[in-house]
Amino acid sequence: MSLVTKIAVGAVAVVAIGAGAAAVLGGVLPMSTDTHPPCEELPTAAEARAALSKNETLAADIEALGGGISVEVGSPCPKGQDRALIQVTYGSKPEREAIGSLLARRDGFGVPVHLVEK
């Protein structure tokens, strides 16, 4: 292979890798942005259950946004850690957007909320 061919193949590879990185970092390819605080910063499971119980109306309003939505106490931490949050599970992008819109207009549960796609 000649030097010119090697340079051309190298340039194409660099452009392809750059385009792939730009697509991922620029949001062209969707990546989940739903995260939760570190486990040591989450409330106890009892505190999360109390927050859900205190805000039953908000939970019902969220679930009413779509048939694939559920609201429950969830623990994203390793077994043995008594840490939890409010976990909202949804099935579609429109449901996710409706949940986000509702939570932006309301006071919330008083504990972290984690959105999880089914």
Image (cartoon, helix red, strand yellow):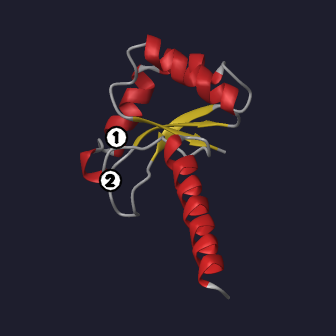
Which one is earlier in the sequence, the residue at label 2 or at label 1?
Answer: 1
Q: In which quarter of the image is residue 14?
A: bottom right
Q: Where is residue 96 in the image (x, y as percent from the top left)?
A: 61, 29
In whole angstroms, how far apart are the C-alphas of marks 2 and 1?
9 Å
Q: Quadrant of the C terminus?
A: top right
Which residue carries the number 2 mark? 82
Q: Position of residue 65 (x, y in %)?
A: 66, 19
Cβ atoms at labels 2 and 1 below 8 Å apart? yes
- Pick the front one: 56 or 75: 75
Residue extending furthest bottom?
1
> What residue is rendered at 70% in x and 34% in y?
92
Q: Quadrant of residue 95?
A: top right
Q: Where is residue 25 in the image (x, y as percent from the top left)?
A: 49, 47
Which residue carries the number 1 mark? 46
> What residue is rendered at 57% in x and 67% in y?
11
Residue extending furthest left?
40
The amino acid pointed to by label 2 is Asp
Q: Characterize the local packing of mark 2: few (<14), some (14-19) or many (20 or more) Cα atoms within 10 angstroms.
A: some
Q: Position of residue 84 (x, y in %)?
A: 38, 45
Classify 96 as above or below 34. Answer: above
- Pick the front one: 16 or 69: 16
Classify 94 as above or below 73. Answer: above
Q: Please, what secondary structure does the residue beneath circle 2 have?
A: loop
Q: Characterize the local packing of mark 1: few (<14), some (14-19) or many (20 or more) Cα atoms within 10 angstroms.
A: some
Direction from residue 40 to residue 63 in the image, left or right: right
Direction from residue 106 to residue 67 in the image, left or right: right
> What residue is rendered at 63% in x and 24% in y?
63
Direction from residue 101 to residue 110 in the image, left or right: left
The amino acid pointed to by label 1 is Ala
Q: Quadrant of the N terminus?
A: bottom right
